[in-house]
Amino acid sequence: MLPVPKGRAGAEFLKLTFAVRTMAGEPTVSLPELRSLLASGGARLFDVRSREEAAAGTIPGALNIPVSELESALQMEPAAFKALYSAEKPKLEENLIFFCQMGKRGLQATQLAQRLGYKEARNYEGAYREWLQKEG
């Protein structure tokens, strides 16, 4: 994997990487990309594991919405979403990154979000397992 440049060049690099991966049918983000996006505030992070799994540990800043609730959550009115999850409902054009423990539920969440019109939805391919090993 190539190192991610810093600053504006890094942002352009990430856009290009995303475009290439999306065209290849792989709406994913790697750990270096995730680090950069989180540091810059360039994406919203969603933990789609169960509440019990997320309570045991999660990636800082992630909002926990179990994959079983995601479809209804993303279709809620903004006020209802905020009342239930104590966060703003994501906008269709926002960069959304989903993750689970191993990758399967994160991919399901990404595909679901894309079907609902969230075109910038991606799956963190390393999932919480990689985050815990390398960042935890």
Image (cartoon, rainbow, N blue to C red):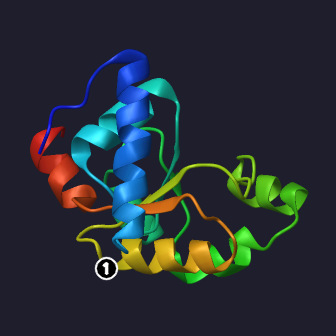
Side (left or right) of 5 relative to 63: left
Quarter holding the C terminus is: top left
Residue at 62 percent across and 80 percent down: it is 115
Residues 32 and 136: in front is: 32
Residues 25 and 73: in front is: 25
Q: Answer with the quarter of the image where residue 32 lies.
A: top left
Side (left or right) of 49 relative to 136: right
Element assignment for label 1: helix
> Measured along the vertical axis of the image, is residue 52 above or below residue 30?
below
Side (left or right) of 111 relative to 132: right
Please give the residue where the numbered disc 1 appears in the rendered image: 104
Q: Answer with the quarter of the image where residue 80 lies.
A: bottom right
Type of the residue with mark 1: Lys
> In this figure, what is the number of numbered marks?
1
Whether residue 27 can be seen here: no
Where residue 90 appears, x then y in whole percent?
Answer: 70, 53
Residue at 70 percent across and 46 percent down: it is 87
Where residue 100 appears, x then y in whole percent?
Answer: 34, 67
Whether residue 95 can be seen here: yes
> Measured along the vertical axis of the image, is residue 14 above or below residue 41?
below
